[in-house]
Structure formats: structure tokens, C-alpha cells
Image: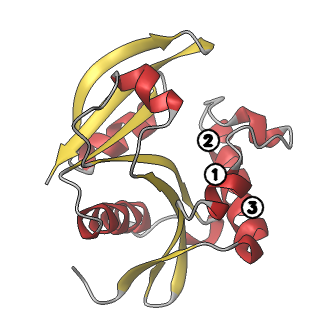
Amino acid sequence: MEKHLKSVIATSSDYEKVFNTLLDTAKWLNKKGSNQWGDLLLGNDVHRTDRAILNQNVYMAYSKDIYLGIFILLETQSSWDAELWGEDSEGRVTYLHRVALAKEAHGSGNGKLLMRIAMNRAIRNGNRMIRLDCVADNHYLNQFYKDAGFTLVETDKKVSSNSHSKFNLYEKTF
């Protein structure tokens, strides 16, 4: 692991910075033609980032003390993950959510650094696999996850709790 890459658990005092990072990413996705995270554009945090911070699941990522962005790691399945992936009775799987690059960190490969930091954190937490989902028609993000070394394991997954979108499922084993 590179010494200049690090992640710290976000605290409640970081909520505004975390939320603004998510909002900036939602705006960026919208400009790319995706409605992913559109709830944030309306000021709605349906994923309850405040609760994720209290549960110590939100990480802020840095490279050489420069803020790169945030990600959420879950060591146990959420109901969303169980609906997408099926019940995980085996454990030792990390679920990656809400990968968001800071507005000022776009370009220069910082998205890849952010993903590397998230994977390093999952490994440090003792897990053997990391999983994520992505809106199926978001071509940019699907390619980004493939380029980051994730394997596409299912396409166009429909879930009952979200009738508007289909999702692609990715995983990476360590």
C-alpha cells in the first residue's frame, strides 16, 4: 500500500463536506447524462449519509493530504445489497457504495486512487472480496469499474425496490 494514500472515518462534523462531495458528483453524473443519485439534486439524501457516518461506514480519502473524495464501505449486507446479491451467509465481503470524487480532484487519475484506497481499506478490514453495483446504462461508470479491475458478474439486474433502473453487479476478489 502506498504511504501517501490514506482514508479516515468521517465524523458528524464532516457531514457537510461529505454531502457536498456527493452533491457535486450527482451534478457531474447528470452532466454525463445519468440520473443516478438524482435524489441529491433535489436535496434528498435517501441513503441517509448522516446515519452511515454515525455507523462509521463513511471514509474520506486523501493522497498526500489532498482530499480526493469519499466512499462507503459496509462489512455486513444492507437490505439493498441482499436484494441485489442474495443473502450473504458466508461473510468476509465488503460492499462499496457512494464512491464520490471531490470536485477539485477530477482528472489526473484521482478516481483510480480513490478506488485503490477503498480496496486497501477493505483488505485491511480482513475481507476477501469487494462488491458494488452501478446503474446499468451509465456507460462511463461501468467502464471505470472494469478499468479498476472489477469483474462484471451480472447485467441489467432489476430490483423490486427500484422500478426505474437496472443495475450491473461487479466484484473483485483479493
Q: Is residue 82 left or right of 70 when viewed as pictured?
A: left
The foreground one among 110 and 7 is 7
The disc label shown at residue 29, or none = 2
Disc 2 to disc 3: CB gap under 8 Å: no
Between discs 2 and 3, the one toward the N terminus: 3
Q: Is residue 136 visible?
A: no
Quadrant including the N terminus: bottom left
Tell me residue 143's x, y (percent).
33, 38
Residue 64 quadrant: bottom left
Q: Secondary structure at mark 3?
A: helix
Question: 10 Å neighbourhood of mark 2: few (<14), some, or many (≥20)?
Answer: some
Which of the two marks, 2 or 3, is nearer to us in this view? Answer: 3
| Marks 2 and 3, how far apart at CA | 14 Å
- Which amino acid type is shown beneath numbered disc 3? Asn
Q: Residue at x 24, y 49 (%)?
A: 92
The disc label shown at residue 20, or none = 3
Q: Is residue 161 left or right of 115 when viewed as pictured?
A: right
